[in-house]
């Protein structure tokens, strides 16, 4: 297949290959979403509501309505940062399931320190300091799982979850203790005044956190696809023995991936506090960490693609809240809807794999044995494949 | 059974060695996998009291065929007849029920259980384990096989040959009438192979039908009563018992070689001699006395039994090929990993030229020209989700000119990859093709290209031709010779003695993590290596 004659055929085959790969990715990601909304619609119909008006409301309130659109974009900021953090870890084959703890602990520090700091060092330095601090807190909260995994191979699924519980508890302890406001009522931190929060963009209510989030997700994309660090992390995730064999330093890479992941997720916590809530009420826990996991998998761990899925999810969350209130359905239905997305994602993946392994069978079986008409076929290594298949 | 076939002798099973209706017959078996026809209308007769050797290169479709017979795979087309009745074998349990027992190439025993417990592992209807019945069955079979261990030892304490005997017992456990052995000699010492031959003879006399899969021609001739040859999924011919008994070894070899390789014979003649006859032993020649690699007193731990290294002393000179022989799993992989830097040592030191390298990391040794062609080319050697070009630079990530300032330079990488693809004749649609889609032979070429480029000084080859077709194996051999001519020192680990004899200047023998001795290549090297392999 070498030589000038083959080159145009090769590039043709390559672009066809890419096209098919692209189509597969789109179908594998979009089909589950469509199916989930379809089955979700059936459930709404069974509940005696009109699915069309429900979805109509959802889109109206989450996307078309100016207020809803702004809300959706505001919601995207922390979700994108969490997605960025998760993609770094998952690409490196590390299951950081402790996003909620990292998020809340970072948020608690930002909320607890920002209001008092504004008075002494001014708004901009406070905001910057809080963002940096949140990133450090988020990263620090991954350090124990990272070191345990790097040094002793302890399963990070368990350690990150455990650290998450501790982080959530610690955040609440801080808010009820050192960070608690003197104002009475529910335990919470002091409130950062609206004019001291992350500045809004273009006269809308959208705060500049979305810029930080988009910058982060694009940075993750560039690092993962264009740099040597990205490739190293990818190899670590794809083939750990291969990483050792290739002379990479898995222990170091594990720690780096965890720290970057935690820092991004910590940033998400600060952005939500500094941009939206201004204060940390006790028991605040949006639990976005686990919700973003299916989104990044739908995006096949592609950072740019995850923007689309995060946007979709934000619209569903923001628009769906109003829509479900109007249709008198529990807002938990939205979670069920995303559960369905996950379910169909698993089913399409299964079907795709099964089809992939048998796709050639009908045409090959019908043809009168390709091995016989061309016994002299020059490629000697072809026949190795059946044995691999047999095992 | 005989009603269906008027020509059948009344009692086909009893007539050991006599022709009659086949006990099991495969008729027109066809099985395809994506892109490959693994078996194309293959028919095979398996008779009681006869050893049917199934011969073919790696990838000829032998494993697929026996997987179908043992119920692991179901055929796309064709049928299986047992005693004249057409049947469907849809699971390994079905096959066992029909009396078809299989010993797979890789052991399937549970190392932490005793022999007896392993043997009782099959489908058992009773709630209580039938220890007494099992013990008497064990006694029966151990007498038949000439087993020299008791039923209450842990399987992990047995040597590989003994473990294989347990596997055979397991296959025969439920009164099997057909015993399938998939490449049973691949992990045995020469002595072990001879013992296996004796065992098979005894079993045959008892009326058992044996299917013996091998890619080694002499084994097929020595152990088989009937030989069938598979090539590219097609049964290209067979040799009947009468022919086998009357023909001389040379005639048979020639006939079978013709079948295995078809029209390629002429072009491959040279390599065949090498493979089949052991070839001319490479004359020991140590042109240079310059020591490249010096291993002294090295010890290392292993995660496997028998793999821990101790007191390894070995030197490799410039341009020299030092072979490492031994039964698989006796510390060869650990030795390779220790040299590559993937495994720490607990004692001793390793010197590359004048430099102590035992505290250096994998990448630093790579930089110094110490290269490791791993035997696990799909597992650790390549990253299947990355393309060919990236796999070729896998060990140079972040280095100029392929990366500058941390940023990837795809043009540079692709250009280098195009060059290596050309030089090493790697068959791939493009350098941007995922390596996971290439065949094993081409993956090995990628690994070789990566390790042998950028000025190697010493290369550790770990089973470099394992599982490859003959032509690619030949290519690998040429590469090893070429490196040797360029002055590169090589450590060639292999379980194929023929390969070692054809390529090495000296052959070191490993057993249980120790070097048993080093033999200069030359006359009667085979015997001396064999002696060292079993010495303790």
Image: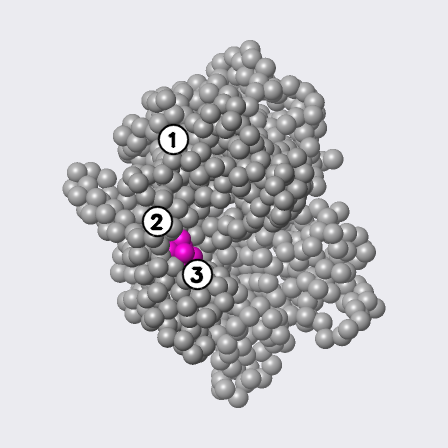
Lower position in the chain sequence, tag 1 or tag 3: 1
With respect to residue B433, does B316 lie above or below? above
Instruction: Name the residue carrying label 1.
Output: A227
Locate the N terminus of chain B by quadrant: bottom right
Residue position for label 3:
A321
The front one of B514 and A245 is: A245
Residue B124 position in % (x across, y down): 71, 72
Q: Residues within 10 Å of mark 2 (few under 14, many from 20)?
A: some
Q: Is residue A373 left or right of residue A33?
A: left
Q: Which residue is drawn at 70% across and 41% down?
A: B305
Q: Give the mark nearest the N terminus, 2 or 1.
A: 2
In the picture of the structure, the residue carrying the numbered disc 2 is A70
Stretch of the chain drawn in magenta: A311-318
Q: Residue A355 carries which label?
A: none
> Real-space Cα distance between discs 2 and 3?
15 Å
- Whether residue A375 is visible to the viewer of this picture, yes or no, is no
Residue A316 is one of the magenta-drawn residues:
yes
* Label 2 and label 1 in one chain: yes
């Amino acid at each position: 297949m070498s030589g000038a004659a083959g080159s145009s055929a090769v590039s043709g085959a390559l672009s066809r290959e890419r096209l098919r790969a692209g189509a597969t990715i789109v179908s594998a990601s979009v089909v589950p979403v469509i199916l989930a909304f379809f089955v979700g619609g059936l459930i709404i119909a069974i509940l005696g509501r009109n699915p069309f008006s429900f979805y109509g409301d959802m889109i109206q309130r989450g996307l078309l309505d100016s207020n809803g659109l702004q809300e959706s974009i505001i919601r995207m900021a922390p979700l994108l940062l969490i997605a960025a953090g998760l993609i770094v870890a998952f690409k490196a084959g590390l299951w950081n399931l402790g996003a909620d703890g990292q998020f809340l602990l970072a948020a608690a520090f930002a909320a607890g320190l920002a209001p008092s700091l504004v008075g002494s060092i001014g708004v901009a330095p406070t905001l910057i300091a809080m963002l940096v601090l949140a990133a450090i807190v988020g990263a620090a909260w991954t350090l124990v799982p990272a070191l345990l995994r790097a040094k002793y191979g302890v399963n990070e699924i368990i350690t990150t979850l455990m650290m998450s519980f501790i982080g959530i508890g610690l955040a609440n302890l801080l808010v009820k203790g050192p960070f608690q406001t003197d104002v009475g009522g529910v335990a919470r931190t002091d409130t950062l005044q609206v004019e001291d929060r992350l500045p809004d963009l273009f006269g809308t209510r959208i705060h500049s956190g979305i810029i930080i989030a988009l910058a982060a997700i694009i940075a993750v994309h560039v690092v993962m696809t264009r740099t040597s660090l990205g490739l190293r992390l990818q190899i670590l995730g794809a083939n750990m023995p291969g990483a050792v064999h290739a002379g990479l330093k898995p222990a170091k890479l594990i720690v780096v991936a965890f720290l970057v992941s935690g820092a991004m997720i910590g940033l998400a916590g600060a952005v939500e506090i500094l941009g939206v809530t201004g204060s940390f009420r006790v028991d605040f826990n949006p639990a976005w960490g686990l919700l973003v996991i299916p989104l990044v998998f739908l995006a096949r761990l592609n950072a740019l693609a995850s923007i689309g899925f995060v946007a979709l999810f934000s619209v569903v969350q923001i628009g769906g809240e109003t829509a479900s209130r109007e249709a008198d359905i529990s807002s938990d239905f939205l979670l069920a809807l995303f559960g369905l997305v996950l379910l169909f994602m698993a089913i399409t993946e299964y079907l795709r794999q099964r089809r992939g392994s048998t796709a050639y069978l009908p045409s090959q079986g019908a043809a009168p044995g390709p091995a016989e008409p061309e016994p002299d076929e020059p490629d000697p290594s072809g026949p190795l494949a059946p044995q691999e298949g047999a095992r | 059974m005989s009603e269906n076939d008027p020509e059948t002798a009344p009692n086909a099973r009893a007539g050991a060695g006599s022709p009659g209706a086949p006990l099991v017959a495969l008729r027109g078996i066809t099985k395809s996998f994506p892109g490959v026809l693994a078996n194309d209308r293959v028919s095979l007769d398996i008779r009681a009291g006869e050893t049917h050797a199934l011969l073919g290169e790696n990838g000829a479709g032998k494993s697929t065929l026996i997987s179908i017979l043992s119920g692991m795979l179901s055929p796309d087309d064709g049928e299986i007849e047992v005693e004249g009745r057409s049947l469907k074998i849809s699971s390994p349990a079905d096959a066992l029920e029909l009396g078809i027992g299989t010993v797979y190439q890789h052991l399937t025993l549970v190392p932490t259980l005793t022999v007896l417990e392993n043997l009782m592992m099959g489908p058992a209807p009773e709630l209580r384990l039938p220890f007494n019945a099992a013990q008497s069955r064990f006694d029966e079979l151990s007498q038949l096989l000439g087993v020299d261990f008791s039923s209450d030892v842990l399987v992990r304490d047995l040597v590989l040959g003994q473990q294989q005997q347990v596997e055979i017992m397991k296959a025969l456990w439920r009164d099997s009438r057909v015993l399938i052995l998939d490449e049973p000699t691949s992990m045995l010492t020469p002595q072990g192979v001879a013992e296996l031959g004796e065992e098979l003879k005894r079993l045959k006399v008892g009326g058992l039908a044996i299917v013996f899969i091998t890619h080694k021609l002499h084994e097929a001739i020595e152990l088989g009563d009937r030989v069938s040859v598979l090539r590219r999924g097609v049964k290209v011919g067979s040799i009947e018992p009468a022919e086998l008994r009357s023909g001389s070894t040379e005639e048979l070899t020639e006939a079978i070689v013709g079948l295995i390789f078809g029209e390629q014979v002429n072009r491959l003649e040279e390599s065949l001699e090498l493979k089949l006859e052991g070839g001319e032993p490479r004359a020991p020649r140590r042109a240079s006395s310059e020591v490249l690699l010096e291993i002294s007193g090295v010890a290392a731990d292993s995660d496997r039994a028998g793999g821990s290294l101790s007191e390894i002393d070995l030197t490799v000179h410039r341009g020299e090929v030092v072979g490492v022989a031994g039964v698989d799993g006796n510390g060869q992989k650990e030795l390779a990993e220790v040299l590559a830097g993937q495994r720490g040592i607990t004692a001793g030191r390793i010197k590359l030229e004048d430099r102590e390298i035992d505290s250096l990391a994998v990448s630093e040794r790579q930089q110094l020209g110490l290269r490791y062609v791993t035997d696990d080319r799909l597992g650790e050697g390549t990253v299947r989700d990355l393309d060919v070009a990236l796999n070729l630079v896998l060990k140079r990530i972040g280095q100029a000119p392929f990366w500058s300032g941390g940023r990837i330079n795809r043009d540079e990488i692709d250009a280098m990859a195009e060059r290596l693809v050309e030089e090493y004749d790697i068959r791939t649609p493009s350098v941007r093709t995922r390596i996971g889609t290439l065949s094993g032979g081409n993956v090995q070429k990628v690994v070789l290209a990566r390790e042998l480029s950028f000025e190697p000084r010493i290369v550790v080859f770990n089973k470099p031709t394992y599982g490859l077709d003959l032509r690619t194996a030949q290519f690998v051999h040429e590469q090893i010779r070429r490196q040797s001519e360029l002055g590169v020192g090589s450590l060639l680990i292999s379980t194929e003695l023929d390969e070692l004899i054809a390529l090495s200047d000296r052959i070191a023998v490993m057993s249980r993590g120790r070097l048993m001795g080093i033999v200069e290549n030359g006359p009667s090297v085979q015997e001396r290596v064999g002696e060292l392999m079993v010495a303790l």
